[in-house]
Amino acid sequence: MSEPRARADSAVSAVRTYVREHRAAFLGDLAEWLRIPSVSAQPEHAADVRRSAEWLAGKLAATGFPTTEIWETPGAPTVFAEWPADDPAAPTVLVYGHHDVQPADRADGWHTEPFEPTVADGRLYARGAADDKGQVFFHSLGVRAHLAATGRTAPAVHLKLLVEGEEESGSPHFRALIEEHAGRLAADMVIVSDTGMWSEDTPTVCTGMRGLAECEIRLHGPDQDIHSGSFGGAVPNPVTEAARLVAALHDDRRRVAVPGFYDGVVELTERERQFFAELPFDEAAWLRTAQSHATLGEAGYTTLERVWARPTAEVNGMGGGYQGPGSKTVVPSSAILKLSFRLVAGQDPDQVEKAVRAWIDGRLPAGVRAEVAFGAATRPCLTPLDHPALRSVVRAMERAFEQPVRYTREGGSGPAADLQDVLAAPVLFLGISVPSDGWHAPDEKVELDLLLKGVETAAHLWGDLGETWHDAR
Amino acid sequence: MSEPRARADSAVSAVRTYVREHRAAFLGDLAEWLRIPSVSAQPEHAADVRRSAEWLAGKLAATGFPTTEIWETPGAPTVFAEWPADDPAAPTVLVYGHHDVQPADRADGWHTEPFEPTVADGRLYARGAADDKGQVFFHSLGVRAHLAATGRTAPAVHLKLLVEGEEESGSPHFRALIEEHAGRLAADMVIVSDTGMWSEDTPTVCTGMRGLAECEIRLHGPDQDIHSGSFGGAVPNPVTEAARLVAALHDDRRRVAVPGFYDGVVELTERERQFFAELPFDEAAWLRTAQSHATLGEAGYTTLERVWARPTAEVNGMGGGYQGPGSKTVVPSSAILKLSFRLVAGQDPDQVEKAVRAWIDGRLPAGVRAEVAFGAATRPCLTPLDHPALRSVVRAMERAFEQPVRYTREGGSGPAADLQDVLAAPVLFLGISVPSDGWHAPDEKVELDLLLKGVETAAHLWGDLGETWHDAR
């Protein structure tokens, strides 16, 4: 047995022992936090969201973080904590998560009280168990296990935690907050603990999230709904024109047909396509999860490639004219289109907006006027497969899970990209939640075994990064 | 002066004298009828609709109709009146109109009480003044003027009046009613007095109405709205597919692209195109009336040809997914499309339905299911320009208006086509309303001069038909 291998084995054992000994207290604390209904979307829970922030700040201080602060926003408060390494040359890591949760009511179909954590069959049921309190909280025990296993009094990395309180409400003040505190948040890398793994049996690390550009288009035709008998066939119909726009969004191979849309797209490497292809993907099961009855997407890509690594143009909503019972023979006055574009690395939301606006400009007949409004965009983020910090995450997970770790990506979009953007740091993902955890749904849960693997992974990760970061770079 | 011409001039003068002498009583009676708020769409006015029918039946009896009846339907009552000619070989004419009116409220923007008829500047303002009580009622004085001018005691035609009470509610029981009474209603021709003329200065006769086939299409994709980040780009979106259907409805020349749609269409003759082209059409003014900002339609046709004589496919409404404020990143579960097809002579609604269903069938990807429902259709109707009864109508109008009468058509659809269908009789149109009369709008009015020209036209028409029908056929 080689010397580093032996050292690793002994670390695995030391971490595991520490976690086992502190499991009960850790779960007791987490349950206490989960009892606080920190629902950011519901104004009546504003005080609970604040209480949740205060609870976490207090707990992190008790854990040993020398600095814990509550940062105010115009909305809900964010928790910031910092634990410097002894070695000033140690890498700086910023961990991101959120302490607010989705709304939950027993009547929605929960089998237990959503804010009364319940353990059954090795699972902890509660709103926020996986999204995201469980995944934030494993870091608190993780850093202690790291210290215990390595005999340190301070972590091997400069550790910063940023736990926001409005993620489930769209993070409306997050960008401004991190811009304001960019100096305090400066880091060599961002670790986002707000995603998940492929499955219980297949530990994975996510290497990217798609970005998101959203746009609302209003088309105006006649000044009011007019009679389709008197005028139909001789004046433009804004609903028809809206439909023609939507139909023209994709070509017959279901590629987005907006000129310039794909400019800069970082294509999948053969290696990553191979990784995706090796995942135990059951398309029929995936379709059941998607509640859909067939797959359809950009020609030349698999389903996983389509949702993880390809940009899209989606109609989220559309309306115009009469939608009630029966019929009404009108040429509608206006139409509304809600479009969203999922973006992948290499795409710039501003460029996409320009491309879409230019594309719309040329497509409408005289007599139909468009108002186009783009909202705030989320950028895509991508961890290169050969990034040294990614290798550290994979090694740390492999020690915790004792099996090979594979790669996935995430089709959704999150505020992580703002951190990448504002802090100019690579974003990595460390999550142990699995698809069956029921994010945003009744009976949200976390698998206790996986939660503790998350603790172990965090413990290993700080040690690995402290040892390898500077050499690796 | 030729003998027939002298006879015609003397008839013109006799009719005019009679109308002038009975003008005041006629307008007094009409005002009495207009005071009855016979709004068929509002259940609280059901008794008024009945009172309106009874008032009319009584008035027609007083006018001299030997038979007046009230025909019950599951909805509002219809008035039937009959006045046979002395000569059993005289042609039978069925006049159609309706005694119900659109809703009206002073608060909608009326300058007078809608059910308190008011004369100002030669106009009679009231709900129903033009649509359709005024145009029904001119027949009551018209037949008396005909008798007075010709010295007859019975009209020169077998005259039947059918005045329904649910036209403004879509005539839900009309077809069944006329099928039930087809024997009583049998006629050589139907004269519909529920349309209008080109303008005050340009008397016209309408020669056709478009038909109407209406269809609702529901497209079903995912079983519920699903997350566009997790699934977008890999499953079909029913709103996108609905939009692709709508976009495919027309080709780039804005012709309806459903195979078989134009099968059987009676094309405009060069003569009719010439007639339309000679009308004093002001496209800018027409666009103002249409509250539209440009024309658009089937290539190769003028605006009037498009609305009067060409079939259309129109989206009356469309909806799916999120239409509220802000955004919601979903792949919608379903979409709804409300389509209507205006039909012209030669098109069969059943064939159009078949063509549309077949066209939809081939166009949807796996994973999107369509429910297609067609409602009851209205057939198109068209009076051939060389029809002898049309020549009678034109002659009668030219005597009343003392200027050439031109031809128009009507882009809308009406129950007249049911009469054509069930009674197997040609439909002709005799209306004196003008576009400024404000049908269905506040301040509905009728021009008194034109109303009295309507009386004169009816008077001349019965004489002319009695004299010429058998020879002409």
Image: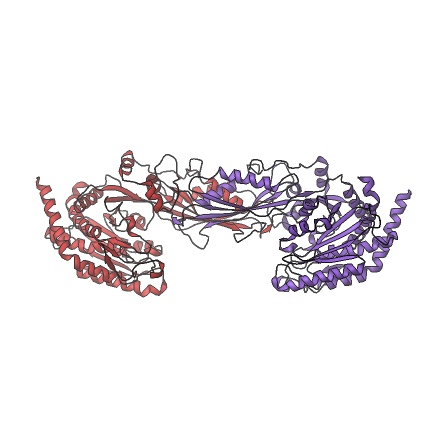
Chain colours: A purple, B red
Q: Nearer the viewer, residue B277 or B459?
A: B277
Question: The N terminus of chain B lies in which quarter of the figure?
Answer: top left
Residue B170, percent from left and from top: 35, 54
Q: Quadrant of residue A34?
A: bottom right
Q: Work out whether residue B283 can be spotted.
A: yes
Residue A34 sits above or below residue A244 on the image: below
* Number of marks present in the image shown: 0
Residue A320 sits above or below residue B117 on the image: above
Question: The C terminus of chain B lies in which quarter of the figure?
Answer: top left
Q: Nearer the viewer, residue B366 or A147?
A: A147
Q: Quadrant of residue B397?
A: top left
Residue B410, percent from left and from top: 31, 45
Q: Work out whether residue B65 can be spotted.
A: no
Q: Nearer the viewer, residue B423 or B315?
A: B315
Residue B384, percent from left and from top: 26, 40
Q: Residue at x 11, y 41 (%)?
A: B5
Q: Could you tell whether A97 is left or right of A218 in the image?
A: right
Q: Nearer the viewer, residue A185 or B406?
A: A185
Q: Could you tell whether A450 is left or right of B301 in the image?
A: right
Q: Quadrant of residue A89?
A: top right
Residue A93, percent from left and from top: 77, 48
